[in-house]
Amino acid sequence: MEKVAVFLAEGFEEIEGLMVVDLLRRAQIAVDMVSMSENKQVTGSHQITVTADTTIGQIHFESYDVLVLPGGMPGTNRLKECAVLCDALTAAYKNGRKIAAICAAPTVFGKLGLLKDKKACCYPGMEDELYAKEVTYQPVTVDGNVTTSRGLGTALVFALSLIEQLKGKEAADALAKKVVYE
């Protein structure tokens, strides 16, 4: 079974994180919500507190097919500051495993130099922090093993893209129909 980790830092954008978790689980993909601290309680940027499944100190990064970063502030900055996560993202990228980020979070990939040969998108106004080969303005951009998306309004399309990459277009289309996405 496919397995995905969604990393939740204090101040994450709730919809961007939870939309991915919800839709991937509906598609029968195993998803762990991973707290960036040793506390499983994580409060998002709009004061919604979520209980993560596990913590960053308890996971084995290599066991995941995709590492996902929701955006939001100051959550994105906290993701950038975590050396353990940044090392894991770099290793996953170099080993051809999938990494994905939405909103401000693609700038984490930019900071790590992972987009220098990639097309990528992000939240409007943050494009200079991508350091990408090419900036796109599509809702979702997939370039090799890197998936990026623009923001809360593109969260559903972002999640469906991940489902398509892991389970195929038919599975993504079936779920889109089930949730009345047109």
Image: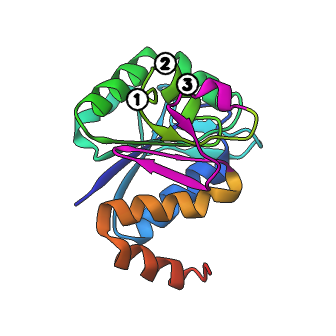
Please tell me whether mark 2 or mark 1 is closer to you in this view: 2
User: Residue tagged by mark 3?
Assistant: 131
Residue at coordinates 76% horizontally, 41% vertically from top-left? 47
The foreground one among 14 and 95 is 95
Spatial distance from mark 2 to mark 3, Cα to Cα?
Answer: 20 Å
- Which percent across, then down, holds residue 53? 43, 45
The amino acid marked with disc number 2 is Cys
Q: Which quadrant: the N terminus?
A: bottom left
What span is in magenta?
126-151
Quadrant assignment for the C terminus:
bottom right
Q: Nearer the viewer, residue 35 or 96?
A: 96
| Residue 92 horizontal side relative to residue 108, left or right | left
Left/right placement of residue 123 relative to residue 112 reads right
User: What is the x, y in percent for residue 32?
Assistant: 39, 48
Label 2: few (<14), some (14–19) or many (≥20) C-alpha neighbours in 10 Å? few
- Using the rendered image of the protein, determine whether residue 152 is visible from the camera's viewpoint: yes
Q: Which residue is mark 2?
A: 82
Q: Which mark is residue 177?
A: none
Question: Do tag 2 and tag 3 residues touch (Cβ < 8 Å)?
Answer: no
Find numbered disc 2 in the image and state the secondary structure of the residue it sits on: loop
Residue 114 inside the magenta-drawn segment: no
Name the quadrant containing residue 72.
top right
Q: Are marks 2 and 1 in contact (CB under 8 Å)?
A: yes
Q: Nearer the viewer, mark 2 or mark 3?
A: 3
Q: Amino acid at mark 1?
A: Ile
Q: Is residue 143 above or below residue 169?
A: above
Q: Which of the two discs, 3 and 1, labels the residue nearer the N terminus?
A: 1
Q: Please tell me how crowded label 3 is: few (under 14), some (14-19), or many (20+) other residues with Cα within 10 Å.
A: many
Q: Name the spot of residue 111 as percent of width and height, x first.
A: 52, 20
Q: Where residue 56 is drawn, which disc sits there?
A: 1
Please report the residue visible at 55 percent of the width from the left and 54 percent of the height from the top. 140
Amino acid residing under circle 3:
Tyr
